[in-house]
Amino acid sequence: MRHGWVVGSVVILAMLFRFTGVHRANDVFIDEITYADLAGQIAQGTVPSILGNPFFLHPPGSYILNSWVINMFGLEGHPMDLALQLRWVNAVLGAVTVGVCCLLVRGLVGVLPAAAAGIIMASDPFILRMDGRLMMETPAGLAVVSGWLLVIVLLNRKWRRPRLWLELGAGLVFGLAIVIKDMTVVFTLVPLLAGVFWRNTIPPLTALRLMGSASLPYLAYMGWVAANGLLPQWFDQKSVGVLRILGAVQMTGFNAVPSADLAGRLIEMTGRFGTSYLLLGLSILSGAVAATSTVATRRTIGLFSLFTGFMGIYSVFFGAAEEQFGYCVVLAALVSTPIAVEMLMRWRPRLRRAFVIATVAVVIVGLALGVQARTVTDDGLVRAREWMVNNIPASATVGLTSVTGEFALLPRDHWEVLPSLLSLRDKDAQYVLTQGRQLSQGYGFAAPELLVWLAGNAEPVFTFTGPTNGETVVWKLDREKLEDAVEAGQTLPPVSGGYR
């Protein structure tokens, strides 16, 4: 606590970054709307479901948390409006996560590395992107690093009753992470188990007690599922989820879209997330170095970083390559890299100057990218909805072409998913909404060719350009040109969704 002001200052910095541009810095993401809807259902006392089917792809931890916030503050409205309001929850939790990581590094390496790591994390553009949306990764990540902080504290204690209470507490916190997102078992229990066999890093009985208490929250959840006769639905959905993580089933992420250019996209986004990519790459390397330390607590964090990095690499090459999977990878890198750097400087003192210069450079560049990330205006879908509500006649038919558009804007009279020229013609649509980046990369319902046809045959009446979705455009259709195209056999069928 002698350096508590350092942690406090870093947390304040993290809050400043996260509280800036909460509603405008990141365009609405489909998962946010889904999670807000599920939280709203729980707040109303119903089983969370999608299209009438109970939802078990992810555990309900984050939805329960947000349902408490909904009831506490009396939040209401369309799921997209709920998602925008609930972003404040993740902004606060994200700032707390920065403080916990700072404490971890402080205890393992020292106050100066902790301050540097805290500043980098407070302003990291990728972490800000996740904390700036209603994503389950933020509360799950907070539980993961909080659990590891407790593990580090208890490993430094002797075999007395307080240590047993710490083991119970750390295990329960890990359990909360798992009941928020069960994929975090790889970031918590797997490193614990590995620590038993790797150089006696974690005593077997300690690992057993930690893993036992970590299972309690999920067992309680499964007891509720069984009591309500929902085990078959849980098993079906969870089986698909496991296959998605393994890569046997590709439904979302870059690997699910053959035409998506992951390498090109990474190069394109380097100007926004350059320091984040550096941290993603360091997770395995820093973890491997830290895992060889002579200090058990440092080895523990090294194993955490190593397995988290392996999971990230596997997701990119074989599994469901979704950007949110990188959240815990960056957290792990931020707590393991200071350990690795300190070890390397002891091994090669001549490297100290180079490491100090590199750290200062990353801090400065990270701060600049963080400011850029939070001052940008990137709320195209919200602006498009406002424009359509105020400028399009209520009786006009509006065609939607993306999954995000469907979840964010429906239900509304005369607005529906119409992702082909044929469906637009048959439903007598007068307007159509497109999100350029989603459609061009194959993530929407409509074929990328629809954008080309609209550019040559329709009038753009609203246009917004943002870094997330590129050009969000409302097009006014020329009914005669649309009819001629369909009659000529140019229907441009959709690429997904089962629509015509």
Image: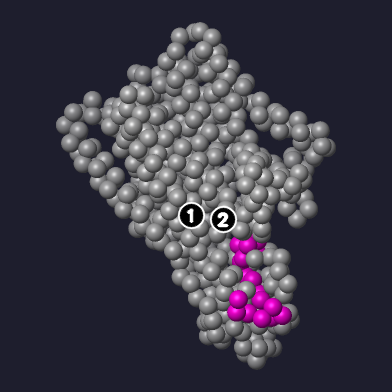
- Label 2 neighbour load within 10 Å: few <14, some 14-19, many 20+: many
Q: Are marks 2 and 1 in contact (CB under 8 Å)?
A: yes
The residue nearer to you, when weighing 23 against 434, is: 23
Q: Residue at x 51, y 33 (%)?
A: 144
Q: Residue at x 66, y 49 (%)?
A: 74
List x then y, in percent, for residue 440. 52, 69
Question: Which amino acid type is shown beneath numbered disc 1?
Answer: Val
List x then y, in percent, for residue 235. 74, 39
172 versus 235 height, above or below: above
The picture quadrant where one finds residue 346 is top left
Q: What residue does disc 1 label?
A: 22
List x then y, in percent, for residue 407. 65, 61
472 versus 5 height, above or below: below
Q: Which residues are magenta?
A: 390-408
- Label 1 neighbour load within 10 Å: few <14, some 14-19, many 20+: many
Q: Residue at x 36, y 19 (%)?
A: 295
Q: CA distance from mark 2 to mark 1?
A: 8 Å
Residue 374 seen by the camera: yes
Q: Give me the disc on residue 84.
A: 2
* Secondary structure found at label 1: loop
Residue 314 seen by the camera: no
Question: Which amino acid type is shown beneath numbered disc 2?
Answer: Leu
